[in-house]
Amino acid sequence: MYDIIIVGAGPAGSTLAHKLAVLGFSVLIIEKQAWPRFKPCAGGITKRCYNRIATDISKVVEDTTYSMVLTLHHRIGAEITATSPLIYQVDRKKFDAVLSDIAVKSGAEFHVREKFLDFEHHEGYISVKTEKDSYMCRVLVGADGVNSTVARKAGFTKFKVGTALEAEVRPKSHTIEDLKGKIHIDFGTIKAGYGWNFPKKDSLSIGVGTFRNMAKDIRDSLHHMLDSEEINNNDEVHVYGHPLAFPHGEKRRYNKGNILLVGDAAGLADPFTGEGIYYAVWSASIASEVISGWFNGKGNLDAYTKRINKEIRPEIRSAYELSVFCYHFFPFVMLNLKNFPVIFSYFADVITGHDDFRYWQVKVPSCMFGIRKPQSKVDIKYIK
Ligand SMILES: Cc1cc2nc3c(=O)[nH]c(=O)nc-3n(C[C@H](O)[C@H](O)[C@H](O)COP(=O)(O)OP(=O)(O)OC[C@H]3O[C@@H](n4cnc5c(N)ncnc54)[C@H](O)[C@@H]3O)c2cc1C
């Protein structure tokens, strides 16, 4: 009998496994893919996320982002450069392997190429069925991503999902050295979403993402983005589609008795920026505190739902409201960004963890009128 079985070894599952294993709990991670595995992802680890990660990931950081080039239809926009790092660029295969390695070193058992199929409740334990075997545990955690089987089998309510198309590009026709240190985000490439170009060591993650009902022409949008980034037929391009958690931040259950969901499986991601690793790691930390407390006779597992709704959900709700505002009033937003560059400093504060999106409706005007002073120092060059 395991204390905890975790389905999925991504950032959420591996972080949780590590945190519980170091406390002495018996933990089994069940992962369906061969490991390390490829995960379609831009691989941007914001500074606020970096600060929450339980181990040193510096050896897998392939580029450090100080500048963000934000454009509209690849024309007008601004290049914002901060004095300290904003985002660390990683290859997900290597990054996720670092997290799973420390989980194993801490004592977690790790089964790969083993697909979780179903579970059953029994008096005092849960039986878990995979395609290879059956196991018993006291607590089952779904860390199995946006299409979570655990969530479906346990009957959790669904959350809104978006669509992303990502191209992994190895340029052959030109060098990417001059793209290093900055990312490009374009807001005109796709409706109610954005296109991105995040450089890695010797490749680029170029993609587009939006709400599912807006994704009809997503392939054309990706081609447009690739053309604009000067990617041509000589370059090696592999395209992957993947759903994105796009929650609206409504109150939901994140546990049902002894079954908990973390990360994408719980629909915890930022619907404005698409950032999910931060929430995967954050929800895993909360889950580890609640689960260890429960085993030690302190509180019950419903505390997990309460804490996610209290600590994480308001941030996601605020990000959702901000995205709705920006996409509806884009010209107004652009005008204000031009007249009040301090808004970029507030945004940099959010990315670096000095601030958050909560009460942005008050914080942004307070910054504009000098009442609130963001900490981040940024230099802005406008692109006409
Ligand atoms: C195109 C794209 C770009 C993105 N870019 C960024 C970015 O730049 N920065 C950022 O912060 N976020 C980004 N995200 C979001 C980020 O990828 C996710 O939020 C993050 O991977 C969530 O981690 P997780 O551990 O919850 O789930 P995952 O990383 O999806 O891991 C889930 C694991 O569960 C396994 N699994 C699934 N089903 C089963 C089963 N039945 N049995 C056993 N194992 C199973 C899977 O194989 C997988 O390894 C992006 C997403 C997409 C689609």
Image (spheres, rainbow, N blue to C red):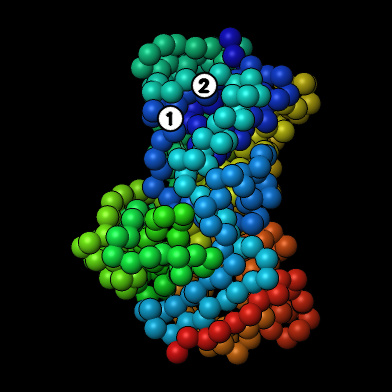
Indicate whether 383 appears above or below 149. Answer: below
> Residue 4 at x, y = what percent?
60, 21
Seen in the image, is 317 located left or right of residue 93?
Answer: right
Left-right relation of 283 to 23: left
**Residue 224 point in image, percent of width and height:** 27, 70
The residue closer to the viewer here, 213 or 338, is: 338
Please tell me which residue is depicted at 45% across the width and 40% down the height of the picture: 93
Front residue of 297 and 286: 286
Q: Nearer the viewer, residue 159 or 232?
A: 232
| Mark positioned earlier in the residue sequence (2 or 1) | 1
Asked if residue 309 can be seen in this view, the reply is: no
Residue 198, percent from left and from top: 45, 61
The C terminus sits in image quarter? bottom left
Q: Quadrant of the N terminus?
A: top right
Going by the numbered disc 2, the residue's amino acid type is Phe
Q: Which residue is mark 2?
A: 110
**Measured along the vertical axis of the image, is residue 124 above or below residue 198?**
above
Task: Specify the quadrant of the image occupied by residue 225.
Answer: bottom left
Quote the CA–CA distance across marks 2 and 1.
10 Å
Which residue bears the numbered disc 1?
35
Viewer-nearest of discs 2 and 1? 1
Please name the residue shown 29% across and 60% down the image.
Answer: 172
